[in-house]
Amino acid sequence: MVALATIALGLTSRTGFNLFPQALGKYPGDVFWALLFFLILAIVRPAWSTRALAILTFGISCADEISQLYQAPWINAIRATAPGHIVLGSAFSWLDILAYVVGIGFGICIDWLLFSTSHKAARRSENAPFLSQHR
């Protein structure tokens, strides 16, 4: 449910129906992009610690942002499509990385709010000891 709301808010932030102040520009979309990746990883890997989810999400976000420095015609053609632009972005910006950190921070807060200590212990996996440290 939270992931669906994140998708809706993220897409809305990039349309004429933007619910956010214009002063924030495109950055709410970047915040929701990183939050969505955090939530997807949490759904796919529920036993992983919050720390592991945050680190991997940050790594994916930075890799995506750094990939925007590569400007070959074939990838720019993909970026020119709506889905390609949403997933791949178009131009490198340090402010995008800051927005990703904010989105990951929201993911950490949501994870903390939704899962009590007892539930976190139940979600840990015995076969992933590094990743299942204190969630």
Image (cartoon, helix red, strand yellow):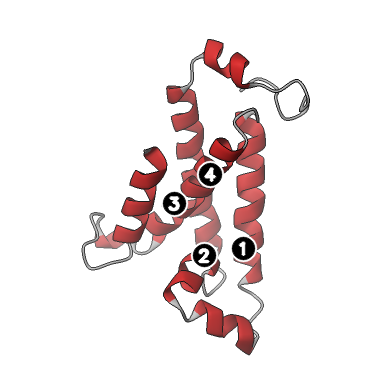
Closer mark to the observer between disc 3 and disc 2: 2
Q: Mark 1 points at which residue?
A: 64
Identify the amino acid type marked 4.
Ile
Look at 59% across and 39% down and name the residue there: 44
Look at 47% across and 46% down and name the residue there: 35
| Whether label 3 touches label 1, CB < 8 Å | no
Distance (Cα) linking label 3 and label 4 = 14 Å
Identify the amino acid type marked 1.
Asp
Closer mark to the observer between disc 3 and disc 4: 4
Residue 49, x across and y down, in percent: 64, 28
Residue 113, x across and y down, in percent: 43, 23
Distance (Cα) linking label 1 and label 2 = 8 Å
Distance (Cα) linking label 2 and label 4 = 14 Å
Question: Looking at the image, which residue sits at the far bottom?
Answer: 73
Look at 76% across and 28% down and name the residue there: 128
Q: Mark 2 points at which residue?
A: 87
Secondary structure beneath label 2: helix
Q: Mark 3 points at which residue?
A: 31
Secondary structure beneath label 1: helix
| Whether label 3 touches label 2, CB < 8 Å | no
Please tell me whether residue 33 is drawn above or below residue 56 in the rendered image: below
Mark 4 or mark 1: whose residue is earlier in sequence: 4
Mark 3 or mark 1: whose residue is earlier in sequence: 3
Look at 44% across and 51% down and name the residue there: 31
Q: Mark 4 points at which residue?
A: 40
